[in-house]
Amino acid sequence: MILAAGHPGFLSPTGVEIAFVLVGLVTFGAALVTVATRQLVHAALWLVVTLGGLAVEYLLLTAEFIAWVQVLIYLGSVVVLLLFGLMLTKAPIGRSPDADSGNRPVALAAALVAAALLVWVVVDAFRSTWIDLSTVQGSTDVAGRSLFQHWVLPFEALSVLLLAALVGAIVLSRRNGRPAGKETR
Amino acid sequence: MHLAYPAVLAALLFCTGLYGVLARRNAILMLMSVELMLNAVNLNLVAFDVWLRDTLHAGQVLTLFTITIAAAEIGIGLAIVLLVHRNRGTSDIDRLTDLADPPAGTGPERADTVADTPQKSEAAA
């Protein structure tokens, strides 16, 4: 938007950009370890690093409310749920040799092709686009106002969805919910 | 900040998640990769919202909705994985081949177990 006045080039980064790239490298590296490690519990712990790095990126993009929601929901509950799931399914603690399936080369090729295409398209499209971070865009005040003024109905619908998910998870995980007629075990 | 930085990071994270979904064998590791893909989308939404200075802040609100739906998804997904693990003794996706062609499958009578599960949950709800 502001690029009419000539945006700064890639060779003279600002401090925010340097921080963003460094945290982004850590985030991406942790994501790679998450999908590549053979120790299942370590994958969950590296996922924490990835999600925390993304929270820092949200802070650098001045979306602070999203950052704290990310910390609360993802780091607080989703990772804990995943760890519980790993332990309840008796995941091996050490290295498990069969963490990756046989179609790993195909997956690697597909991911590399997709990454090359996406990065090429994105860089080509947004090479000269500049985000002005001078004003805070996502403080709790701004996010709350827009959420409860313009987005109230989707918000309420989402609470119904959460309730349905809660009931569904309870029903799915209840032992012997029905009399033994349909159970085969 | 250049918009290219968050966009490229989101693309790379998405492809990492794509590799994880395709290559992992454990169902919970697949769910982790799905979370990576959802987070890449969230980063894109936030970056474009900050760039466009949307008056409704649609990108950030949609990010909140995505985070909520991801939480619901991980809850239901883990419940299903635990149910499969309880019924089959494994959460190995390569061995859940009841819907595959008959020579590769484990038999038609075990497929009934999976087919009954949604009906059972509906009836109980």
Image (spheres, helix red, strand yellow):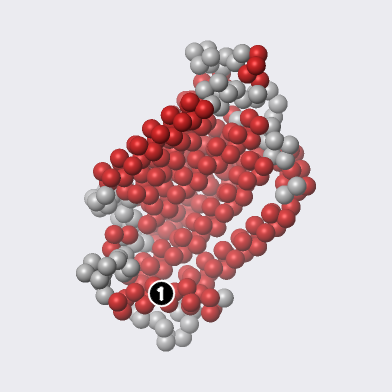
Q: Secondary structure at mark 1?
A: helix
Please say if A105 is above or below A23. Answer: below
Q: To which quarter of the image does residue B48 belong?
A: top right
Q: Position of residue B19 (x, y in %)?
A: 36, 44
B84 or B6: nearer the eye?
B6
Q: Amino acid at mark 1?
A: Ala
The residue positioned 48% from the left and 52% from the top of the image is A80
The residue positioned 58% from the left and 23% from the top of the image is A129
Q: Can you see residue B104?
A: yes
Q: How many marks?
A: 1
Please say if B2 is above or below B19. Answer: above
Relative horizontal placement of residue B47, taking residue B31 as reference (left or right): right
Relative horizontal placement of residue A68, taking residue A179 as reference (left or right): right
The residue positioned 56% from the left and 63% from the top of the image is A165
Please say if B2 is above or below A92. Answer: above
Q: Position of residue A145 (x, y in %)?
A: 76, 43
Q: Position of residue A178 (x, y in %)?
A: 48, 82
The residue positioned 26% from the left and 49% from the top of the image is A103
Q: Position of residue B96 (x, y in %)?
A: 31, 65
Mark 1 crowdedness (10 Å alpha carbons): few <14, some 14-19, many ≥20 = few
Please say if A47 is above or below A180. Answer: above
The C terminus of chain B, quarter of image? bottom right
The N terminus of chain B, quarter of image? top right
Task: Write down the chain letter for disc 1.
Answer: B
A37 or A142: nearer the eye?
A142
